[in-house]
Image (cartoon, rainbow, N blue to C red):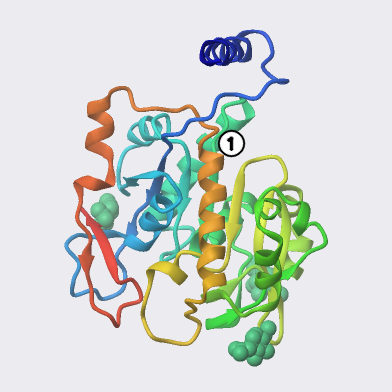
Amino acid sequence: MCSPVVVSAVLTACLCGLLLPVACTPQLNYRPIIGVLAQENIVEDVHALGSSYIAASYVKYLEGAGARVVPIRINQTEGEYVKIFNSINGVLLPGGDVDLQTSQFSRVSKILYDLAIKANDAGDYFPIWGTCQGFQQMTVLASNKNLLTLTDTKAVALPLTLTPGAQSSRLFRTFPRELLQALASENITSNFHSWSLSLQNYSRNAKLKRFYRILSTNNDGKKDFISTMEAHRYPFYAVQWHPEKAPFEWIQKAGMVHTSSAVSASFYTASFFVSEAMKSQHQFLSLMEEERALIYNYSPVFRGVQSVFMQNYYFD
Ligand SMILES: *[C@@H]1O[C@H](CO)[C@@H](O)[C@H](O)[C@H]1NC(C)=O
Ligand SMILES: *[C@@H]1O[C@H](CO)[C@@H](O)[C@H](O)[C@H]1NC(C)=O
Ligand SMILES: *[C@@H]1O[C@H](CO)[C@@H](O)[C@H](O)[C@H]1NC(C)=O
């Protein structure tokens, strides 16, 4: 019973690499490691132990869905980023507050993004996820422009207006039907952004339209803006809302939601992205290099119950 299965798995692996690169399903990597990009500390932070940070909620979000995390620090050389890229199975660009064209965060995003485009074009599957600022950064990367506009979306929970294609999208088709219904009818997506990609600017920009398919929109009372999208031809996904906040951030303010469906929506987005990372076969050159890179080498700092990010990791 056991050995024929093993033999056929080995055969499939061999055939995949040698004979049938397109037709067969590659082996999944059940030990995925996802890089989370750090960013400059630009707001006053009395707890800061370094000039850049990663909010711990993004780390827990990925860990809770079966991935390990490696911090990607800013201000490193291009060569160092190539090495990290070849060692990890996906990148998450988190929310935050830095400039999308001049910050170190934006510089490193572009390096990783260009590497991911090249890898995917060569058949080396590599997913990217953007949340809030990460979403916005991905619109700048795809269009080479900042097309964002100010919206009234600073601390508000909204139901998603799903597009006709949402149900058959790669991201949402993995969601239970009741959860998709909850996302469309309950105010469970947390919005904490001043800038948005309006439906108008998306529709008028050929590069964005060619690259991304819109899965949901929202309205701030005046403008329709894009809230969820996935790339047509790349495993790139972006949400303007904050799935990681429902289970992992606890500041008491408008827009924060901790209902079961909000927590469930958080898990399904993370689980989907981790399942995409499982399709990447990148790995560290040695177990020792992997050990040195993992987030477990750092300790998050508790910043108090009134903080937007309850715990941060600090670097440099
Ligand atoms: C990154 O480098 C720039 C310029 O070299 C410097 O101003 C900045 O403080 C550095 N930031 C971090 C987080 O190291
Ligand atoms: C469209 O993008 C431009 C920047 O190129 C911005 O100034 C403008 O406010 C945007 N308009 C809308 C409706 O989003
Ligand atoms: C839910 O969001 C809608 C906007 O889509 C808003 O009109 C409504 O007041 C919100 N409901 C609650 C209970 O916050």
The relative height of residue 240 versus residue 298 in the rendered view (above or below) is below
Q: Amino acid at mark 1?
A: Ile
Who is closer to the viewer here, 143 or 273?
A: 273
* Residue that extends furthest to the front in the rendered view of this protein: 1
Q: Residue at x 32, y 61 (%)?
A: 56
Q: Residue at x 27, y 47 (%)?
A: 295
Please identify the quarter of the rendering in which residue 308 is found. Answer: bottom left
Who is closer to the viewer here, 195 or 20?
A: 20
The relative height of residue 299 versus residue 296 in the rendered view (above or below) is below
Residue 223: horizontal and vertical position, in percent? 71, 80
Q: Residue at x 71, y 85 (%)?
A: 222
Q: Residues within 10 Å of mark 1 (few under 14, many from 20)?
A: some
Residue 203: horizontal and vertical position, in percent? 78, 62
Is residue 214 visible to the viewer in this orientation of the structure?
yes
Please identify the quarter of the rendering in which residue 233 is found. Answer: top right
The residue under label 1 is: 117
The relative height of residue 294 versus residue 7 in the rendered view (above or below) is below
Which of the image's four quarters has the N terminus? top right
Q: How many marks?
A: 1
Residue 113: horizontal and vertical position, in percent? 52, 42
Is residue 198 visible to the viewer in this orientation of the structure?
no
Q: Secondary structure at mark 1?
A: helix
- Which quarter is ligand 2 in? bottom right
Who is closer to the viewer here, 16 or 293?
A: 16
Who is closer to the viewer here, 51 or 71?
A: 71
Q: Is 38 situated left or right of 19 in this image? A: left
Residue 20: horizontal and vertical position, in percent? 69, 13
